[in-house]
Amino acid sequence: MFASASRALSQMLSPPFRSVLLRSMGLALAFLVVAGIGLHRLLSWGLGEGGVWLETTIGPNASTPVNVMEWVLAIAAGLGIFAGAIFLMPAVTALVAGFFADEIAEEVERRHYPADPPGRALPLPRAVLEGAKTAALSLLIYLLALPFLFFAGLGLLIFFFANAFLLGREYFEMAAMRFHPPQQARALRRRHAGTVFLAGMMISAFVSVPILNLATPLFATALMVHLHKRLLGGTRELILPDAEGGPGRAIPG
């Protein structure tokens, strides 16, 4: 496990990965900026409407207290957007991974496993759909964990372990589906659920570090490519899915 993580980290700054790193970071930042602008406008509208309602209800003498309260709430909203961006990173990086996972996996396989048969890239719509589903689940987990953030960090634990499960599942299945039909990839993940969850904890820890977490798709995909190879053991009989995602054909490694 740790050897796989070490190999994934060591390749992140290699020349072939730099282009993918810059593009994935740019796309992740673009998603965050759009989400931040939307949230900021929504909060600004809410503060403005709320201030007008208070002044109308209480009267003109409440103008100064209302303005002070609006300033305080605006600052709190700004801090909330910043904190929200940190918590949104698992969802954002899961979505970004759908665009770049195969490119990253191909480079890992080419460098570390040149003698093995190469995997087959997932159709882009399927890869993006897988990432979008995980992103939506991450957002749901965030909303469910949010009320528990005020109870001795219980929300942070819920958020961490839920992301470990979701991100571990997504990245492992995307790596495995390069060699197996989707049903077999999921069955392989369930068979090694404990190992995949431990790897997911490494990804969850990685995505919790600000700035560094922009590189999550590279680290997580590379980690799961290594893990998938290790879990195959010495059998090396890979079942490549056909173009329609059917049973495919076996290729001895």
Image: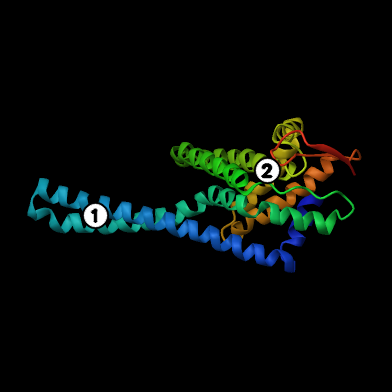
Residue at which label 1 appears: 69
Query: What label sits on residue 32 in the rendered view?
Result: none
Mark 1 crowdedness (10 Å alpha carbons): few <14, some 14-19, many ≥20:
some
Image height check: is 114 above or below 204?
Answer: below
Q: In which quarter of the image is residue 176?
A: top right
Locate residue 249 relative to residue 122 in the image: left or right: right
Query: In terms of secondary structure, where does tag 2 sit?
Result: helix
Between 207 and 122, the residue placed more toward the observer is 122
Foreground label between 2 and 1? 2
Mark 2 crowdedness (10 Å alpha carbons): few <14, some 14-19, many ≥20:
many
| Residue at the spot 75% in from the left edge and 47% down from the top edge | 120
Q: How far apart are marks 2 and 1 (CA)?
A: 42 Å
**Label 2 is placed on what type of residue?**
Gly
Check the image and name the residue furthest to the left. 60
Percent position (x, y) of residue 130? 60, 42
| Residue at the spot 67% in from the left edge and 42% down from the top edge | 168
Image height check: is 206 above or below 194?
Answer: below
Residue at which label 2 appears: 200
Check the image and name the residue furthest to the front. 243
Locate residue 222 relative to residue 234 in the image: left or right: left
| Residue at the spot 61% in from the left edge and 66% down from the top edge | 22
